[in-house]
Image (cartoon, grey):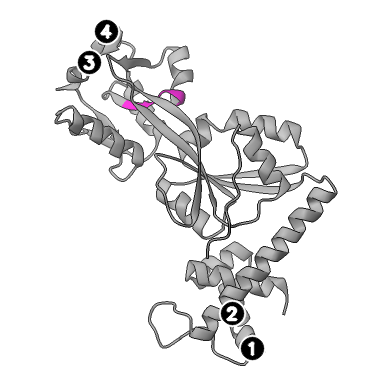
Amino acid sequence: MQIENFKIFADLVETKSFSKSAKLNGITQSAVSQQARAMERHFKTLLIDRSQKQFQLTREGQRVYDSAKEILHTYDKLLSELQEMKKVISGTIRISTIYSIGLHELPPYIKKFLHDYPSVNVRVEYRRSNLVYEDILHNSVDFGLVAFPVKQRQIEVLPFRNDHLVLITHPQHPLAKVGELDLRQLTGQRFIGFDPDIPTRKAVDQIFRDNKLEIEPVMEFDNIETVKRAVEIDHGVAIVPQATVQQEVTQGTLAALRFKGKDFTRPLAILHRKGRVLTPAMKKFIEILGLELHEAPRVE
């Protein structure tokens, strides 16, 4: 029995999917099934209850999974400690991030990190917010970056920074000349929003409710770049994170306005799975982001 067998089995249990476990380990779905049966033959007991429609472990399977997690944790800890003893900063860091952070907040940090630690590879995947949490829980990435973080038992949340929300308009839009905007001036405007399930959209909807404004978007998009393009061609106005429009404001293709007497912010956070071993490279990445690392005890 090799360490890879335990990892494939643990991934299968956590994703409850043969195809997802296969993808995580770079093998075929059939190979995952064969690995599971090989473990059953090795331990001479059924590990997966195949009489159920949904993926479910037997009692023995749960015991093997618990031990597999212990073995994998000990193995990862050993590798990390050996790297630290040799003062080695190398490997690959996998990041899952929403578009707005990945495109506009993260690049300067990655640039500095790669300059300081050229032996480390950084892979960035752009995902919707709910899928970032899924990536963390399934151990398919090392870090996640989200806005308006939601606490979950198995996820460590490290506050990153707060971004200001601003209203963006076409440079020739009447509101572009008012300087600071009273929220009530949005009444009657063609408003462009994010899709309803996106956290920033939920925050904007809450702002409208708190200020007793009934504003329904005339358009909805799933990413910041499309929202900006719609405003640039004067299809409406939008509320977006300030950091995402700095280039367009400088170039004069968009105007950005603060809100009079209000300061709406968007909290950003770094996520990683609780209890996982962080490699020296991962710890250095956290340092580059200017955060303090608090490694929590293992969570089963």
Tell me what residue is drawn at x 36 percent, y 16 percent.
256
Closest to the camera, between mark 4 and mark 1, is 1
20 in the magenta segment: no
Q: Magenta residues, as a range? A: 239-243
- The answer for how far apart the CA atoms under marks 1 and 2 are is 9 Å
Residue 275 lies in quadrant: bottom right
Looking at marks 2 and 4 on the same chain, the residue that comes earlier in the sequence is marked by 2
Looking at marks 3 and 1 on the same chain, the residue that comes earlier in the sequence is marked by 1
Tell me what residue is drawn at x 66 percent, y 75 percent.
5
- Residue 101: image location, x then y, percent: 49, 35
Disc 3 secondary structure class: loop
- The answer for how far apart the CA atoms under marks 4 and 1 are is 73 Å
Closest to the camera, between mark 2 and mark 4, is 2
Residue 183 lies in quadrant: top left
User: Would you name the residue on which mark 4 appears?
Assistant: 178
Residue in the foreground of this view, choosing between 185 and 283: 283
Identify the mark at residue 182; answer none if there is no mark: 3
Label 4 is placed on what type of residue? Val
Asked if disc 1 and disc 2 are in contact, CB closer than 8 Å, the reply is: yes
Badge 3 crowding class, 10 Å Cα cut-off, few under 14, some 14 to 19, many 20 or more, is some
- The answer for how far apart the CA atoms under marks 2 and 3 are is 60 Å
Residue in the foreground of this view, choosing between 297 and 21: 297
User: Would you name the residue on which mark 2 appears?
Assistant: 64
Label 3 is placed on what type of residue? Asp
Asked if disc 3 and disc 4 are in contact, CB closer than 8 Å, the reply is: no
